[in-house]
Structures are given as C-alpha cells and as structure tokens.
Image: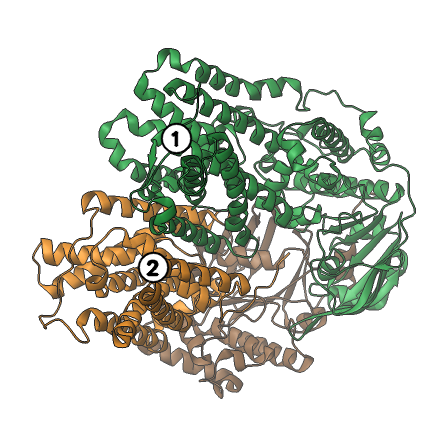
Chain colours: A orange, B green, C brown
Amino acid sequence: MIESIVSSGVAIGCVYALIGITYNVMFSASRVFSFTAGTLGMLGGVLGSLFIVRMGLPVALGFVLALAGGAVLGIVTEIVAVRPVLKSLDQHLYVLSTLALALMVQQFTAIEWSTEPQPFPRLFDIARGGFDQQFWLPMLACAAVIVGLEWLYRHTLIGRAFLAIAEDTYAARALGLPERGLRLASYALAGVIGALAGFAGGEMLLAFFANAPMLTFYGFVPVALGGMGNNRGAVVAGLLLGLFQQTANFLVGGIFASVAVFTVFIIVLLARPEGLAGRTLQRRV
Amino acid sequence: MSTPAASWRLSRAKEPGAASTIGAALPFLALLLIGVLFPLFGGGYWGVIATRACVYWVLVSGLNLVVGFAGQIAIGWVALLTLGAYTTSVLAAGTVTPAFSPYLALAIAAVVGAIFGLIVGLPALRLRTFYFAITTLGFATIVTQVALAWQSVTGGGVGVAGPIFPEPFDSQWGFYYFCFGLAAICTWMTANVAASRFGRALTAIRDAEVAAEASGISKPALLGAVFMFSGAVAAVAGGLFAALQSYITPDAFTLDLSVLFFIAILIGGRGSILGPLLGTILLTVLPEFAAPLVAWSTFLYAVLLLVIVLAMPGGIAEILDFKNRRPLESDRAIIPRPDLVERLLGAPRDAGALTLEQVALSFGGVHAIDGLDLEIRPGQVHGLIGPNGSGKTTTLNVISGYYAQQVGAIRLNGAALPVFARHRRAHMRIARTFQTPRIVGSASVLQNVMIGGTIDGKGTFVESLLSLPRHRRDEIMLRDTAMLALAAVGLERLAAARADRLQHSELRFTEIARALMLRPAFLLLDEPAAGLSAEEIGRLGALLLAIARAGTGVLLVEHHADLIFDICHHVTVLNLGRMLAAGTPAEIRSHREVVNAYLGG
Amino acid sequence: MPISAADPLLDIAGLATGYGKIAVLRGIDLTVGAGEVVALLGPNGAGKTTLLRAVSGLLPWSGRVRFAGRDLAGAGPRDTVKAGLGHVIEGHRVFTQLAVLDNLLLAAYDLPRGERAARVEQAFALFPEIAAKRHQRAAALSGGQQQILAVAQGLVRRPRLLMLDEPSAGLSPVLVDRVLVVVRQLREAGTAVLLVEQLIEKALALADRVYALARGSIVLEAKTGEADLPHRLEHAYLAATSRHP
C-alpha cells in the first residue's frame, strides 16, 4: 500500500513539477505567467493519443510530433498572447490574453477530440504491475528535463543567454542580445517541456481535455510554493504535492483530498506570498 | 466646509452637468422599457432566455465591482453561484432543516454569499494578480466537489430540486418579472456605487494604487465591502438560477459559466455599468441564434476575450463613449488662478512644522539617507535638491510613509508620524504628487481630482448603494470642490475629458489639483517641473507660491535649479544622503561646495 | 562647412525623444569624429542617458542619426552593435548570476565561435584584474570591477565608437581613475568615445571636445583647450532663464 502511494505520488508529483517548470521557463523569459502551461500538459496527452492510437503512428514518431505540437502552442502563446501585451501600460492584461488562448485550445480539444477521457497508448510493451511504466515514465521525464536544463544553462551559449534575459532584460538588450528571438525560443522550450509532462503522464491521466484546468492549478502550486522562476523549488514542491495528494486520497478519498490540497495551498500562500523559498518583494514608488 | 466651493460655482459649459446625466440614463431607461414590455412580444422559449439573462446580470452586476472597478481577476466566482443555489434550494426544500419560505432562504443565501465572498476575495490583499486568479479557480472547483461529495445535504450527483416561489412569481412571466425587478435594483445600486466616492476609489486602487493610498483610501476596507456585496448578489443569483432550472446538479456549475460572467465584464469594458450589462445580454443571447453555436459558445467567448484584450481593452463601453471622441482644443494653455487657491484652501491654520530629526535609511549597504535634519514650515516653500542618488526622492517617500526610517523621527507639530502608514498621511493633511503622474486614465479629469477628496465624504458604502441623502450631499460637495481645484490650477475646461487624453504637463497639474482636495497642511511635490515648458514652469511656480501663501508648507523636490531659486524660501542641498548645505536660495547659489556637488566636481 | 573636414563618425541632427508623453530631448545636434573623445556633461535630469539610449536604439527617436555613413533610423540595439556602435549602460549592470567569462561570451553572442573566444581573450588581456576572476560569478566582483567588466563587454565587439554612461558613478576615487585610464587606452587604440560624466574636471582632462546638455537641449559646445571653460559650463548649467514669476 505504501509503495503504491509513494510511486503514484512521486509520479504525479513529477508531472506537476514539470508543469511548474513550464510556468517558470515562460516566466524567466517574460516576467509573466501564462495560463497555457496546464493546457500544454493536456495537449501532450491528447496529441500522443491522437498520433499513436488514432493515427497508428509509431511511438517514437508520435512522441516527437506531440512535443512539436507543444512547441507550436508555446510559440503561439508568445506571439499572440504575451508579446502584444508586454508593451501595454496595463500590467495585467497578460492574465486575460493567456487565459483566453488557453480556453480556446481547451474548448477546441473538447469539441473536436472528445469530452470524455480517451485511452493513452501503452508506450513500452512490458507487462503491467509492480513498478509500472506509468509511474517511472514521468519520473524519467522529470529527471531528463532537470538534467537537460542544467546542461543547457551551463554548457550552451543560448542557455546562458536565457539566464541573462531572466536576470536583466534591459542590460541584455543593450548588449545586443536578440531579446525577442530568445524569448520566443524560451516559450518554444516551455511548450516542449509541458507537452512532455502530459505525454509522460498520459498513461496515468489519459487523454482528457479536462486535464487542462486541473494541471493549470496543480502545476502552479509548485511555482507558488517553490518561488517564482525557481525550478529546483518547483521540483521539491511538486513531489511533496504529489505525495500529499496521494496520501490524502488514500486516507479520505478523492474529493476531500482536493479540498485538503487546496486548503493547505491557500494557508501556505497567505502566510508566505513569495513561496517557501522565495524572497520578499520590495516596494517601488 | 463646503462654503468656499459652494459659494463659487463655475457655470461654464465644460462642467459635466444635468444634461449629461440624462444622456447617461437614457440607455438604461430604454432597456428598462424593453424589459418591462418584453412578455408582450417574446415567446415562451425567449422568456426563459430573458429570465436567464436577468439572473446572470444579478451576479455580474456585483462581480463587475470586483473585476471591472477594483480590477481583481476573480475568475472563479461561479463558486458563489453554486453556494447560493444549494443554500436556497436545501433550505426551501426542508430536507435537512425545516422548510423555509423561499424568500427567507434567498435572504439567508445572501448572507452566506457575503461571508464566502469575503473569504474568497480576501487573499487578493496578499497575493499577486496571477496567484489570486488561480486561487479563485481553485475555490470554484472545491465548491463543486463538495457539492458532489456531501450527499446527505446536497444530494450528491443526483442533485436537489430548486425553490419554487409562491404566487404571483410561480408562473413563467411572474418569475421573469421577479428576476427582472431584482436585476433592475442591482443595476441601480451598482450604478450608485459607480458614481460615488467608493466607485472612484475602486478605480484608483485598480489603476493608481499608490495615489489611492496617498489619498487616504484603505484598500482592505473597500475591497472587503465590495467582495461582500458581490458575494451576496451572486448567491441571490444562485437561488434564482436554481428556481429557473427547477433542478440543480453539481455539473450545472461549470467553469464555462464562470468564464462567461468574467468575459461579459471585460467585453463590456471596465469601470462601466452599461457595458457589462450589454455584454451579459449579448453573451446569454448569442448562442441562441444558431444551434451549432451553442457547443462552441465558450470557444467564441474566449476568442472575443482575446480580441478585446488585444484590440480594444476598453470594450463596448469605449465604443459607446462618443463624447470622448470629440477633439480637444489644440492650443490649450494651463493658466492657474492663484486667487482661487486661497478660496479653496481657506484661511491659514497653524499646523506647526513638519520636522525630520537625524533620519537615516539604508538599502542593502547603501546609505540612502544618512542623518538628515529638515524643517518644513507652514506658509513656506522648501526646496530639496541634489545630484542623482542623493536621497531626495527617498526623503519624500519616507515623509509620506512609503518607506520607514531606520533611525530618527519625523514629527508633525511635535508628534511623531507612524511609519509605513502611508494611507494615514492623508488624514493628517499631508498630500503629495508623484514623479510619474499616477492617474486613472479611463476616468475623467474631474473624477480623478474628486478621488483626492475621498476621505472627506461622510456617507457609508450602504448609503451610496441606496443613494441616500448623505451620499448625494457628499457628491455635490466633492464635485464643487474638485471644480474649484481644477479652476485654481487652470484646468477647468478639461474637467470632462478622459484623463489619458491629456498632455503630460496637464496631468502634472491634475495631480496637484487632486492633492489640493485635501486642503493639505503640507504638500510634497516630486519633481513636478519635469517635462514642463518654460512658461508652464513659471506658472507652476506662481501656483506653488499661492499655495504657500494660503498657509500650506510646501516641500519641492526638484532638478530644475531655476524653479528652486525662483520660488523657494529655504533650500536644502543633499549629497549622498547627507545635508550638504541649507539656507536661502541666494546663499546656496554662491556656495562653492554646492556648485561642485551639483555639477559633480 | 569646411570641405576638407571628414564626415563625422557619429552625426546627430535635430534629435528628439522622450518616454511616452514626456518629451525629454528636443533638437539635439552633436557629432563625434573618428578617434575622438567627446564628453557630454550636464546636470541630472538633463537627458544625457536618454540621448545615449536613443542613439543605441533602446528608445524610439525622431530626427537624423548617421553612424559611419549609415542611417540609423529604426535600428535597434542589436543593429547598432553590429554596426560598430557600443553602449555601456549606466549602473555597472552585469549578469551577476553568470560567470565573468560568460558575461564576455554573451557580449560576443553574434560572432562565430572561434572568433568569440579570441575576442574574449583580448578583452581579458586589457583588464587583467577581471581575467584573474574569469570563472567566478560576476556577483563576487566589487562595484568597480563590475564596471570594468561592463566596459570590457562593450569592447568585445571592437566598436568604432563606444558610448559610456557615467562609468565613474558609485566608484571610489581609485577605481574611477582606473576606469578613466581605460578610456585613455581606448583613445590611443583609435576607438572614439562618447563619455557621459558627472565628474567635470576628470572628463575635461580626457576629452577633446565637450558638449553641455541642460533642460533637454545642447547649451554649450567647445574644445576642451578653450579658456574659461569651467566658468562657462557653470553658467550654462545654472543659468536662470529670462522669465520670473
């Protein structure tokens, strides 16, 4: 029993952590959060099912196409919902534009794909049971993303350019860095990470349009608790969230588990609005 | 208190007066007429749609104050609809408690809604925008989940029957008129709030929060009131919704519905009552015109939202704002009238001096202010100059309560000023302006100036809601005073214009007019001359001297040496957070060290 | 205009710019010749930083700006850097979360890989004090060292004209001198410099020509050798205008 809680908790926690990282990568590039992060997760699962189950494509190809789909939504988010409002005097328009885009994609999926959860393919032809692939696939994905991002930021110039933009956009621009292109690339990367989260978690969550609002919320909890832009915090918080949720699920059942998660989330956030690892804001007049 | 303003009335054409009020009321009267006569030409099916639109508007009218006026992104307000629906239904059904009359059940639901509105809304005071939006979404999900799980009370997935209202409201048209009547009352109440100091204060919190604080507006109190009102009417809408549906289950309260309410407000335009009203009607009715559209309705709402945000953030209200399309005069000059300043500010009172004693403040390792003594006397203009980074603006921010000094005291007439209490400064008659003008762009110049006098209103929120006499007296007083202030600074001809159409220099004078609404004992100005032409600087100087002559102590933080030397009685020169020199302008000008520091020798 | 005079490297005519509704600069005329050091002086709020931001493309502007014969209308910072116009912004803003080496590599972002490494080594050769810390995070550097790093970033692209915005701000006198030695080195290497400075005496000691900016327009232009210059500058800064209340 404990094994099952731990493996499912860590697995779903990895999915939440990856969505949190998606939020963070977009935030680092533009200083705004986007509602499309959860939708990207949903899309990873839906596209995976579409390409592999409905269209019969080989798993590897379906995987690549699903990630490509995520990159496309990431790029569309930047061009349509973020870039036009960054210049605006009204600082909060991005909440509305990204919400609108996320809703459009979710509704389109519900109508054109299905309103019911659809099966997600079994990716590796191994017998079910024990430490099943639906648990270790998300963990593998999460580890791969963490390692990949480390390599990107440490060993590639573009990764370091991302860090520069995240720290000081103005200085980066003055230095001649291609700020717009880098932001677009960041959003594409975020799209890939989000889609990967949904694809790797597909066997657990199935291909369901309603995963989008669920992941929008649960994927944001790691960001809120771990600190804005803090990927390590997001991973730790995501894992804790997954474990807490599965434990509560086991003890009091699904619905009260959600209530429990939400209540804890609100209380922590009200006590420390910057997250458990974040720093407090300074006022500017 | 209203004597100086009331005894003086500018009857010039540009003052927004009676004619424009009737103009503003016309669309509402037209809708009222259509609504009353609707049953005569609408069929049974359309009756349901019309009733639904009224029920939705009851909720949206309250949410409009939260989203449209206060600018809080509360996406998950369907939670309150759910709460109200279940509370009313369960109480009226008598399954858990003895059966209540539907009216009483509705009233109790309103109270429950008010309480939960406050609970859902209060995190807005602590959380940033996106975080708050996410928490409201979470609330909406939780409430629906609880409805699903709490089978003994809510019937779980099976649901409960909605309340049935007694005669004459049990027929379709009877119930329609009931909902219509409530919708009309909600329209009236929220329109009253919009045209009150509370409505203006909400827009100030939304668009110019630091200016709202400087004007004495308390964000928690005001948001609390608005969340409670919004929660209450949303719950009432829930009860009506349950009656309309006759039977409710948890999956009637989808996120789509929440999105509809929210988008109706944004399509309608923020800060408007008519816009969201039309938006609600539009979004309720639109899917009915084409059957295939019903499935795509939420998709279309989302597209509409995106288009509005990108192309027309002002929404329907902006489209209907004809009077702000008329061009403004092209060769406008700002000509203050110093004689009116005296009339506005009244006779000089002896407020005592504002003193800083050995004030120090560091950020990180940097000494922003390093042991500063300063005295601002009533009736005098005190200049504060120095190179960049010398601590001028920081000093002003400490006096006005935005930063707290770490050492030393700031005293007003001997009594120490509380630290960090920036919204209390207005009550002490300390007013200020900002380096970049902080105004509500979508409101008129007059409304912006009236915001400055918010704390002088005596009527409560409820009195404004019901347009009781004290609220109306407040409005007249604030309007007259604001017109006088605008005339004093030379902007009365622009009173009705939208503030974001004004030039930068005009916005600076608007801020001064707003500050004057407080009849300040002390006026703190943060680089008011920046961006002004030479004549405008001259007129600004004359205005500030007139303000000082009326007894106000003026602190002028400036770069423009000319203005400082022309009008200041005393000048303090800062460098690296310390006082470098202090004295009359003539003394300072010839002070060797000052010249060097200023030029950076 | 003398026929024998070469076209200036940087030629600004009638420049106007501001922030949103606030007009800050009007009708600016300014030139910098190849290899010249020009100082731009003026009191706070005059618009010196705004002028540099407009020229390097960080702000929109109207008027005419030509650099090395090329019209800079519509050019952003990336274009101006590629054209050979460098801008070291105010406040020694380097990327503190990245290593010193990475800061310089990023300055060479658009260059091919091999060349990038070579340029970075050349920058390190000019500034041994930061070469010693190449693998440390920029946050570990002192303010003065960060300023030197910022100047090094500006030099990696070997600009023909380098604009420096108050490089001495916030630095101790020793470090100020170090930075100004760098400026002298630049001049000797043939790089033109447009130097915005608060420290008048030091700037005059280095520059060939000086402009004074006050209240949004140029109020003085002179060669640094001219007599009575400090007095004329003071007068230009603090001159009262003719109007009185």
Going by the numbered disc 2, the residue's amino acid type is: Tyr
Q: Please state if B179 lies on the left or on the right of B458 as rendered.
A: left
Q: Are marks 1 and 2 in contact (CB under 8 Å)?
A: no
Q: At 47% across and 49% down in the image, what residue appears?
A: A87
Q: Please state if C43 lies on the left or on the right of C195 as rendered.
A: right
Q: Quadrant of residue B176?
A: top left
Q: Is residue B405 above or below residue B564?
A: below
Give the residue furthest to the top. Answer: B40
The residue labelled by disc 1 is: B243
Pinpoint residue B17: horizontal percent, then vertical percent. 67, 21
Q: At 13% across and 61% down in the image, what residue appears?
A: A121
Pinpoint residue B278: horizontal percent, then vertical percent. 44, 27
Q: Quadrant of the N terminus of chain B?
A: top right
The residue labelled by disc 2 is: A187
Give the residue furthest to the front. Answer: B98
Q: Quadrant of residue B558?
A: bottom right
Q: Please state if B66 lies on the left or on the right of B456 as rendered.
A: left
Chain to which the residue tagged by mark 2 belongs: A
